[in-house]
Amino acid sequence: MSRRAVLWIAFAVVHVGVAWLGFLLPNEPMGDVYRVYEPWSRQAIDGGAIVGITEAWVYPQLALVPMVLAHAFAWIAGYTIGWAILVTLMDAVAFAMLVGRGRSASRVAAAWFWLGFIALLGPVGLYRLDGFTVPLVIIGCLWLVGRPWVASMILAIATWIKVWPAAVLAAAVVSVEVLRRRGALVGGALVVSALTLIAVVAAGGGAHAFGFIGEQTARGLQVEAPIATPYLWGALLGIPGFSVYYSSELLTFQVTGTDIDVVIAAMTPALIVAMAAVAALGAVKAVRGVRFVSLFPALALALALVLGFIVVNKVGSPQYLVWLVPPLVVGIVLRRAAWIPPALLALGAALLTQLVYPILYNGILSPAALAVVILTLRNLVLIALFVWIVVRLARLQVPLRAAADAAVPARRAVNPSL
């Protein structure tokens, strides 16, 4: 049996197994699908209110598209299974592009990493909107060099479904060496964004076109976010004023405690500063001549996933871990040996996340020692991964030829006869 056949058998087993676990594990890991995705999409299909158009919404407007598409498979066994089938089909397209004929050891290793991550993270990675965007981002990343216009448009579409792929696109723009290709990346994103906004305004949703930004900035500290860890420990230790509560408006669990309003207010500026700092570091490396093959995976991971949207984020939903997959897949494809250690660290974070949610989640909502310790360990792993990737980015060396080329203008300035 060929390597490719084994991979596809594993793909089917992992996806069917994870989809099935959604119905077996506690705390409704697929609850968002039938509690919010199905009602939102159903009312739009039936001619009722359209989220993001007739009312403000927590997601960008194109997020409604996969929610509606899942109805095409609902006849099989209901909307929840329809959603699982839709995400699995999207994964299959990206998986086929990644594996190809199964001849590349690096691509095979990347494929095994992806399957392992899906299995270890569990059903929350499948039964969330984020699971639909991951294969889109993988496809976009694989096409960045050969098809920059198409890659940019795919990444832009993913961004208008869930915001996080914007950082991957920004990382690509900063990293790419060829000016023409950079123009294609920017142009493709602008075309998709313009068409989306035109459609939103034409549908009467201009007032809510960027409503998802305001919805996010108004949030408190979600219980799983790294910044919430001290407040979660305060609740566990019974310190007065520290507790976990449910936000009926945002449909999520948050923490409260001493001076938490100051922390909440500081998180959005901190997120912006952190992302800008990593982007600036990446830009400096690009200007100095560090090649795309070295710079892009590191910058994308640090900017898009660890630094920007997980470690320095006041929202810490468990499905956010799937954001780690595309840059790590690209890293393994480009430089397998160097990217295996962070990939293993990410797999550990995925397993710890599934232990927290959905398995031990009751011990987070009513803080219990085991669940809080595991969540704390998961957050420490993510912070360690962030530190590793920033240090790696800072240490990227300028190739000797690029360094020599950069030195020529300086020597000519000193000695015009050169």
Image (cartoon, helix red, strand yellow):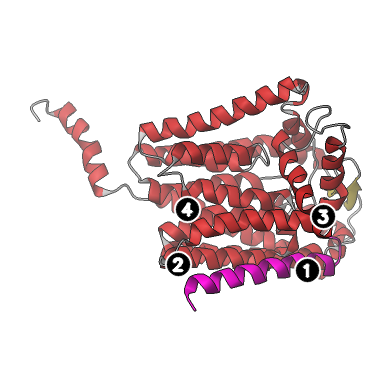
Disc 3 to disc 2, C-alpha distance = 34 Å
Name the mark nearer the viewer: 2 or 1.
2
**Tag 1 secondary structure:** helix
Q: Position of residue 325 (x, y in %)?
A: 58, 56
Query: Which segment did they paint magenta?
Result: 1-29
Q: Position of residue 388 (x, y in %)?
A: 51, 57
Q: Residue at x 68, y 42 (%)?
A: 162
Up/down of 111 relative to 79, above or below: below
Mark 3 or mark 2: name the one nearer the start of the chain: 3
Kindly tell me whether residue 274 is visible in this rendering. no
Which residue lies under the disc numbered 2?
102
Q: Which residue reaches farthest front? A: 75
- Residues tagged 1 and 3 counted as in contact (Cβ below 8 A): no
Which image quarter is the C terminus in? top left
Mark 4 or mark 1: name the one nearer the start of the chain: 1
- Residues tagged 3 and 4 counted as in contact (Cβ below 8 A): no
- Residues tagged 4 and 2 counted as in contact (Cβ below 8 A): no
Q: Is residue 76 left or right of residue 195?
A: right
Up/down of 287 relative to 396, above or below: above
Q: Position of residue 340 (x, y in %)?
A: 48, 66
Name the mark nearer the viewer: 4 or 2.
2
Q: Main secondary structure of the magenta part?
A: helix
Kindly tell me whether residue 14 is visible in this rendering. yes
Disc 1 to disc 3, C-alpha distance = 21 Å
Which residue lies under the disc numbered 1?
21
Which residue lies under the disc numbered 3?
75
Q: Amino acid at mark 3?
A: Trp
Q: Amino acid at mark 4?
A: Val
Mark 2 neighbour density, 10 Å: few (under 14) some (14–19) many (20 or more): some
Which residue lies under the disc numbered 4?
391
